[in-house]
Image (spheres, coloured by chain):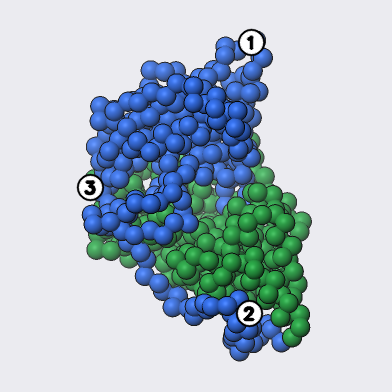
Chain colours: A blue, B green
Amino acid sequence: MEILVCVKQVPDMESKFNIDTSGTWYDETDLAYRMNEYDEFAVEQAVLVKEKLRGDTSVADTSVTVLSIGPERVKDVIKKALSMGCDRGVHIKDEQYQARDPMENASIIASFAKDKGFDLIFTGLQSQDRGSAQTGIIVARVLEMRCVTTVVGFELENDVITAKRELDGGLKAGFRTRTPAVITCQMGLNKPRYPTLPNIIKAKKKELTTIEADTMATAERMVETDALFHPEKKGAGLVLEGEINDQADKLISILREKTGVIK
Amino acid sequence: MKALIVGEYRNGETLECTYELIAFAKKLGAETAMFMVGGQDDPPKYDGKLYMADSAKYGEVNPDVHTKLLLDVAHQENPDYVILSHSSYGWDLAPRISFDLKAGQVSEVVDIDDGSFVLPAFNGKLHRKVTSKTGITVVTVQSGSLNMTEQPSGTPEMTLVGGEDIETGMEFTGYEEVESAGADLTKADVIVSAGRGIGKQDNISVIQELADAIGGELAATRPVVDAGWTDHSRQVGTSGQTVSPKLYVACGISGAIQHLAGMKKSEFIVAINTDIDAPIGEVADVFVVADIKQFAPALSAKLKRA
């Protein structure tokens, strides 16, 4: 069985963001980067499938390819995925990553995947940076694969997938489908493992190929970013800074005055 | 300008977000028509043309089937915009149709700005203004981002669509309700809610202690529940409960839009967070810049003494 996992590298969301001179992106200087949180569930699920099928003589060996699009630095998240148990990495080197829209990114992934016969493609539900929640679904459309999104439960038996989709307000919906399929993963699907030191060392020896994106983006850009900016603070709430005990005293007196709940 | 609104129907009822989409289309200045897979005996309150497919036949949430039905109507109506809610239904369906319609898609719209759309980015810390360059644009709208002023009213001019069987490679096997046992947060006057900023599971007890000291119920954000630090019945947000207590204390919560949607109607909101730029600041009446792990015990001690 051939599995593809698509991961994205995003800045640490706790970072302080400053808008750069282009006005459409942020200043990347000194920011810490990590794997998009939703994608960790995708990597873990791919590795779980592989582990489950290991030793099953009725299927050929399972191999998990991890792919990421972006500048040189995204190799770090590919290496993390390799140390979590993926077998080989593909870096699609792209210097236009700041401007690509989901349709373009999906076309890049589909160009890579189209002749490789992937049975399963796992992606995160969305990215934490732009959060469009489109790319995985469009990949499925281009490759004419079935697609289940927002998945919080996944079982595979031969080529039959039993998946649980999260709807809203705690409701879930069960689906049965077959491979080949794209699965977009929601938080809580599994417990992503931490790479162990031996596995980090092993990962350094795994194959990591680089391909240039320009030849692979077959879609036109349809959505253009005009500006990236800090939202106006509408709340205009009171800010309490300083020493903890003073803050606590002030808060208690405010709550006494403004709410009826503290005596 | 013409917009095709995609209504939502779940467990035999029209969902509230359908009416938000009507308001959104009005704000956009578009004439509207609506598509819905729902119940024809109980259509949404709407003055306009409604293309209704029968959910008894086509299911309430089957993406393949709904994609086909919606595409047929979109080709017929030829709208400038197709508008869906940024819900599990809408964000799933939207890219499926935008691919076929060769339409640019803008996701999670919170505002309209002179033909451009404003979307949250970076967990809501930043906003992004985007323009679609295609003749037809698919839009998903963040629920709660518009102030709805009008009560829904009207009777649609209904056209039934579908009828034939539609092939699908996905079989819906049923809904699963979340276990309802546990806390009913909707009735609480005071909620003290834990976010990822509490650091680790052991610190849930620190937040519980604060909840006890104020006389409130413990709640949590999705990541805290997913990590197994507390149970799902305490989750606030779009995938948990929607609450509006007299006092909501957000402890180490950054304020992802899905969480804000579940608590921003609270009467008084206190946020305790080290990051003054955290989006929870947008809804907070008081923002305490502090590490919750130190602040919560200090506040609990004072409240108990008082």
Q: Output the chain of dot 3.
A: B
The amino acid beneath tag 3 is Lys
Mark 2 and mark 3 in contact? Answer it, CB < 8 Å. no
Q: Which element carries disc 3, helix, strand or loop?
A: loop
Q: Is residue B109 visible?
A: no
| Residue B132 shown left or right of residue B120 in the figure | left
The mark closer to the camera, 2 or 3, is 2
Depth check, mark 1 against mark 3: the one in front is 1
- Please state which of the two labelled residues, at mark 2 or mark 1, is closer to the viewer: 2
The numbered disc on residue B133 is 3
Q: Which residue is mark 2?
A: A245
Label 2 lies in what chain? A
Q: Is residue A199 visible?
A: yes
Q: Secondary structure at mark 2?
A: helix
Q: What percent of the width, then of the height, locates residue B280?
A: 50, 67
Which residue is the site of mark 1?
A58
Q: Left or right: A117 with respect to A242?
A: left
The residue carrying pointer 3 sits among few (fewer than 14), some (14 to 19) or many (20 or more) residues within 10 Å by Cα, namely: some
